[in-house]
């Protein structure tokens, strides 16, 4: 049965009115935040000290932390004089369902390789893992989506580390999404082992000197805005940091979109959060904002980098320039071309899932057994045309 478009039409005025009010509020808050940001010029050390003081009083505090770069500074890309190899990785997965005939999962990793040496052609690399019953069923039951998502993130980094170790010279490793994990793996027994492996792989990448980054398109985070809210507090109210949100719902992207020229980046900030505390020393998380568009038509991305990259001006400069070069390939919708290609390589379609189900059924029959049928609910769903695994 189709949607009731008449009902939707009658409610559109509510939505459009809310969008208008949000834009007005965002404009007001942007002006307030810009004044606060400019007032912090030359106060990196004092600002950093206050954020750390606030974090000591509130373990759940999320905020940006100034580094050595001037808070209000912007940096243009430089010319690329170094040869490099770029690996961009993305992952896709099939989640197990109790409604399937045989519950199974799949993690598919796609990597696109580019070299600054035009004599070396681009390459596509695929690594697919079938999650069998011994993996999917734990003492806690059927593996959940967050565990599979973490295994996918881990598989991406493992593949990047493996590929980077086989290449001489400068290597950049790019993934879609943040390096920080928001699934709080340390408090979940199902994910503690995977998280430990995740950290080991990051240390491997650090040991290889790989310029590692996570690219977040159209970011909605507000780490810098939260920093400004904290620094606005009087000294005797610092214990309330993070609990008062006078600049909400302003995002960092809204704050920076008219402050960062086309192709330029912001200063580098460190991340203060409960989950980021798990990333220590050389893996400590940092980020900067990057305008992949133009000054008149900004397109903001957030680029997360570990400390071993953030601490190298040469690495940050190369990463910045390569990302801008990559984004230019997609014209008016700037996004790193290599990441776009890796997503295409990694994608698992509904047809792929159906083919795997057929292969599983054939393998069961080869053992002289009759494959079980899916649940009645799933059988009914299969009657409709589906083209993609969600």
Image: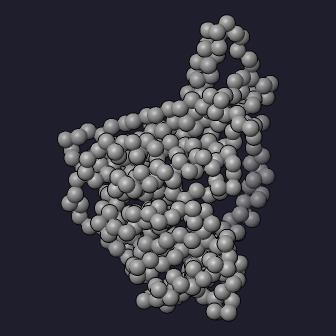
Q: Nearer the viewer, residue 296 or 56?
A: 56
Q: Quadrant of residue 73?
A: bottom left
Q: How many marks?
A: 0
Residue 35 can be seen in this image: yes
Observer-nearest of 282 and 133: 282
| Image x and y of residue 260, in percent | 41, 74
Picture layout, residue 337 above or below residue 266: above
Question: Measuring 75% from the left and 40% from the top, which residue is drawn there?
Answer: 140
Looking at the figure, which quarter contains the N terminus?
A: top right
Residue at figure coordinates x 51%, y 36% from the top left:
108
Q: Is residue 28 left or right of residue 87?
A: right
Residue 126 in picture, x, y percent from top left: 43, 34
Please, which colouring scheme is shown? Answer: one colour
Q: Residue at x 39, y 63 (%)?
A: 308
Q: Residue furthest top?
A: 368
Question: In which quadrant is the C terminus drawn?
Answer: top right
Q: x%, y% of residue 71?
A: 44, 81
- Residue drawn at point x = 22 percent, y = 53 percent: 83
Q: Quadrant of residue 159?
A: top left
In the image shown, does 6 or 131 lie closer to the viewer? 131
In the rendered image, is residue 380 in sight? no
Q: Quadrant of residue 147?
A: top right
Which residue is at the front of the view, 248 or 172?
172
Q: Is residue 271 above or below residue 146?
A: below
The answer to whether 250 is drawn above or below residue 95 in the figure is below
Q: Where in the figure is residue 218, as x and y percent of width and height? A: 52, 61
Tell me if 39 is positioned left or right of 209 in this view. right
């Amino acid at each position: 049965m189709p949607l009731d478009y008449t009902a939707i039409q009658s409610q559109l005025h509510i939505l459009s009115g809310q969008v208008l009010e949000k834009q007005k509020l965002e404009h007001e808050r942007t002006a307030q935040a810009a004044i606060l940001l400019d007032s912090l010029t030359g106060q990196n050390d004092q600002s950093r000290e206050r954020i750390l003081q606030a974090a000591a009083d509130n373990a759940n505090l999320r905020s940006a932390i100034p580094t050595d770069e001037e808070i209000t500074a912007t940096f243009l890309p430089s010319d690329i004089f170094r040869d490099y190899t770029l690996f961009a990785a993305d992952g896709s997965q099939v989640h197990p369902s109790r409604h399937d005939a045989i519950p199974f999962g799949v993690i598919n990793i796609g990597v696109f390789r580019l070299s600054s040496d035009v004599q070396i052609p681009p390459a596509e690399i695929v690594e697919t893992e079938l999650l069998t019953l011994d993996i999917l069923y734990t003492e806690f039951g059927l593996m959940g989506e967050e565990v599979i998502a973490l295994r996918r993130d881990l598989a991406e980094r493992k593949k990047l580390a493996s590929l980077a170790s086989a290449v001489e010279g400068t290597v950049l490793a790019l993934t879609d999404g943040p390096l920080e994990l928001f699934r709080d793996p340390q408090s979940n027994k199902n994910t503690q082992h995977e998280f430990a492996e995740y950290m080991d792989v990051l240390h491997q990448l650090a040991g290889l000197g790989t310029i590692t980054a996570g690219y977040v398109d159209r970011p909605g985070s507000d780490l810098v805005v939260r920093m400004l809210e904290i620094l606005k507090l009087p000294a005797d109210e610092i214990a309330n940091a993070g609990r008062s949100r006078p600049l909400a719902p302003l995002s960092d992207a809204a704050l920076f979109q008219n402050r960062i020229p086309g192709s330029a980046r912001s200063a580098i900030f460190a991340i203060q959060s409960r989950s980021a505390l798990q990333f220590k020393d050389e893996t400590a998380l940092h980020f900067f904002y990057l305008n992949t568009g133009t000054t008149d038509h900004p397109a903001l991305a957030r680029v997360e980098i570990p400390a071993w990259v953030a601490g190298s001006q040469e690495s940050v400069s190369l990463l910045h320039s390569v990302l801008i070069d990559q984004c230019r390939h997609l014209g008016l919708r700037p996004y790193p071309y290599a990441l776009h290609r890796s997503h295409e390589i990694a994608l698992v379609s509904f047809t792929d899932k159906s083919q795997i189900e057929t292969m599983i059924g054939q393998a069961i029959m080869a053992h002289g057994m009759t494959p079980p049928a899916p649940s009645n609910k799933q059988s009914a769903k299969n009657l409709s045309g589906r083209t993609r695994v969600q």
